[in-house]
Image: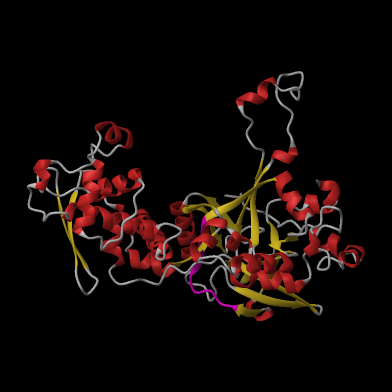
Amino acid sequence: MSSFTGPEIAACIDEDFLLVSHAAFSARLREKTQEMSAGLRRICGYEHWIDGTYLITRVSEREGSDDDEGDDGANESGSREHDAGEDLIIAVNLNGRNDIGEVVRGESRLFELVDGAADDGRRVRTRFVLHEDGTIEANEEGDEASEGVREPEEAAMENEEDGSEHDAGDSEEGNEENEEEAGDSDDEEENEGEEEDAPSEDEEEGDAPPGARRRRGSLMSHLRQLLSPFGPIYEVYQRYRRRCIIAEAYEATSHHFEVDIDTVQSAVEVETFTGGPCDVDSVALCIVVGYDNERAYAKYEFDLHAGMREAYKVHSAMKKCELQAGSVVKTIDEGRQRIGVITKFDEETQLWRITTSDGVLSRKISEMEVVQKARTTKLLVFFGDARWSRAQLLGEIARGHWGLAKSDPIDVANPHDSYRRVVDSGSLVFAPLSEMTEEFMRNALGEMNRIRSSGQLERAISPAPAMPNQPRER
């Protein structure tokens, strides 16, 4: 595939490079999503690629399977030769910010009912009442109580297994007919898994009104459908779960440093992102902005608690300084303007360390202009990520979908503007026109020969000078 992209572009598929969707590719995807429902758009994944600005965070060799041991590609020592095309490329979308601050009244109790398990692991039976004002009351009881009430999980599982779809307002008559159909054949009940979940005679004689158990099960099933990616309140549920994960990390960090939680929240500002289509319910990566290294940020894969502890330490080290780590500043030297991110202050020399795309500078406060002043340490939390094999990604680049550029510290310090900044800077490079280029991309990529001949490609991939006394990467 590198023969279609050129070796220079193939070499850009590396950590800390940006993978940015072409404007024509994004426009094509927007057209395709216009006729889709919100749920279908989420399922197809196109929204992850529109104006995508992916920071490549890891390139690793894909682990071979057991079947590889007998392949002809094994060398004399018996180990399989590495195929670079199978390398795993992992990246997160800097343009995927997801605001979790919006709260719907009563959502917490509703989602707790849907998630449905007691903290101590007991089986819980729940009676709940949906009031006219939309609020929900619930009374949780242990195994020994409420014989006539079934667990929400059981009711939901029953509806999933028998494939039936009910609205919350199904009539008692319709529900009772379904009960009779479920009891027509013992064999059918065993095959469909309904015999165990069907209400017993003892349950029918319980306190619950006739048909109430079925209606509760239907309601829970309906709620779960509403919370699925096809449902209208999926995003509300997603925000709620992400808030819970962030709140837990704040609490754990406050216990670790033996400070109150307000102190941690005033020191660390969390920004959440949907990093990509893979595992969107889990934290894939955390980035501490303003960390003292050649990138001006530190990465923590899968470990939100470790990332938040590091962010708190970065803030504590500079909390008495005029500027916080992560502040964006501008310097002008011999007529050349540089924009960088502050990472450290040396009290002895009174110099600020600034990480730029050209390397690390040391400047006095009078020798720079503050562009964006940070009051807290910023922690970027990415839920989910994007993954390609190297061969797959090279194929998409060859078709013209993606361009590449070396990332700048400001792209991470100010991720909201990263897409527009990279596109406007002219630093993106694309694969040349070839037989792989898709027809709708050809006009958009017509001027790439001019870009490649201008030396822009070489400038885009040239490495920044190494930082002196570089601290050990975390």
Asked where in the image residue 417 lies, by quadrant, the reply is bottom right
Residue drawn 76% across and 25% down?
Answer: 73
Q: Is residue 353 visible?
A: no
Pinpoint residue 383: horizontal percent, then vertical percent.
50, 56
In the displayed structure image, the side of residue 245 where residue 322 appears, left or right: right
Pinpoint residue 101: horizontal percent, then vertical percent.
41, 71
Pinpoint residue 176: horizontal percent, then vertical percent.
20, 51
Task: Check the image and report above or below for 377 versus 17.
Answer: below
Residue drawn 86% across and 58% down?
Answer: 432
Q: Is residue 433 visible?
A: yes
Residue drawn 76% across and 55% down?
Answer: 397
Count of numbered badges drawn on the protein: 0
**Which span is picked out in magenta?**
372-383
In this view of the protein, which residue sits in the foreground, 225 or 426? 225
Residue 230 counted in the magenta span: no
Pinpoint residue 81: horizontal percent, then vertical percent.
74, 29
Q: What secondary structure prevails in the magenta region?
A: strand
Task: Check the image and report above or below for 117 versus 18.
Answer: above
In this view of the protein, which residue sits in the foreground, 291 or 149? 149
The image's colour scheme reads secondary structure
Q: Residue furthest right?
A: 453
In the displayed structure image, the side of residue 169 where residue 350 appears, left or right: right
Asked where in the image residue 33 lies, by quadrant, the reply is bottom right
Residue drawn 49% across and 61% down?
Answer: 39
